[in-house]
Image (spheres, grey):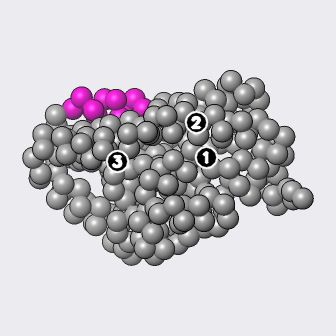
Amino acid sequence: MSAVPKTEQLVLVREDRDGVCTLTMNRPQQMNLLTGEMLSALQSAFDEISKSKEVRVVVLASSGKGFCAGHDLKEIKALRELPKIEALFNQCSRMMQTIPALPQPVIAKVQGAAAAAGCQLVAQCDLAIAADVAKFVTSGVNWGFFCSTPGVAVGRNLSRKHAMEMLLTGEAIDASKALQWGLVNKVVAAADLDAEVQKFASLLAAKPPATVAAGKRAFYQQMDLGLAKAYELASGVIASSFAHEEGRAGMDAFIEKRPPPKHE
């Protein structure tokens, strides 16, 4: 039996080249779910990058067909108790807040579906380039757990009406509409995604790093003064949704591949 390649064993793969650090979520069979393990790996990587003078730009990518399917409902179901579920969402919220706090610009490279917290991750990045086949959805409402934490980042990218449409309907939007609504910066053919992201990252890497860091910091300070409080509130709401009987019923249906429960 041949050994499994080292990169396939890592939940997060890092590659540094010419000032660009590419972080690749590496659980394609799980649609790169934001498990506690994945969140810890991302947090550790971002913490390390924040201290680096060599890294000028970060590209957040993923392996497989999908970008990220959000949280692992099996993991949340196993946690059962509200305090444990809250701890997971607090961990996620901390990681999300680390992205705008980084001195380097972060580009989401979206090759496929970004759902729930995966859509949140795209929205939380400074910039996003998507393949034309990518789709974006915050479908928690269909299953009994409103996408409150994704709503923090999505609501800061889209107009309120568009954000509420995504959050209330749970309907997916395609890459073209994501561009129109302001969720992504560019949409390119899937075959051109690597080259376009590299071109964009190289352009940013050539900018003065201190100027970029100061400018990014100032931008978010004046735009998102309430970010931490918003995440604190939203984390409590979404954790409670998963602990509620509606959320538990929805998790069971999702995991067992049944239609969402009907709520009359």
Label 2, secondary structure: give it: helix
Residue type marked 2: Leu
Give the quarter of the image for residue 190: bottom left
Query: Which badge, 3 or 2, is on the more N-terminal residue?
Result: 3
User: What residue sits right under mark 2 in the picture?
Assistant: 233
Q: Is residue 84 left or right of residue 44?
A: right
Residue beneath the point at 34% across and 69% down: 186
Q: Amino acid at mark 3?
A: Met
Mark 3: few/some/many CA within 10 Å (<14, 14-19, 20+): few
Question: Is residue 234 toward the left or the right of residue 110 in the image?
Answer: right
Q: Nearer the viewer, mark 3 or mark 1?
A: 3
Structural distance between the alpha carbons of marks 3 and 2 = 18 Å
Q: Could you tell me which residue is drawn at 40 percent across and 29 percent down?
A: 44
Q: Relative to residue 58, is residue 171 depicted above or below?
A: below
Determine the residue positioned at 64% across, 67% down.
Answer: 171
Q: Check the image and report above or below for 32 versus 142.
A: above
Of the numbered discs 2 and 1, the one sitting upstream in the chain is: 1
Q: Position of residue 111 (x, y in %)?
A: 45, 63
Q: Secondary structure at mark 3?
A: helix
Query: Any magenta on residue 44?
Result: yes
- Identify the mark at residue 223; answer none if there is no mark: 3
Residue carrying label 1: 148
Q: In the image shown, does 172 or 263 lie closer to the viewer?
A: 263
Q: Is residue 177 left or right of residue 195?
A: right
Label 2 crowd (10 A; few <14 / some 14-19 / many >=20): some
| Number of marks in picture | 3
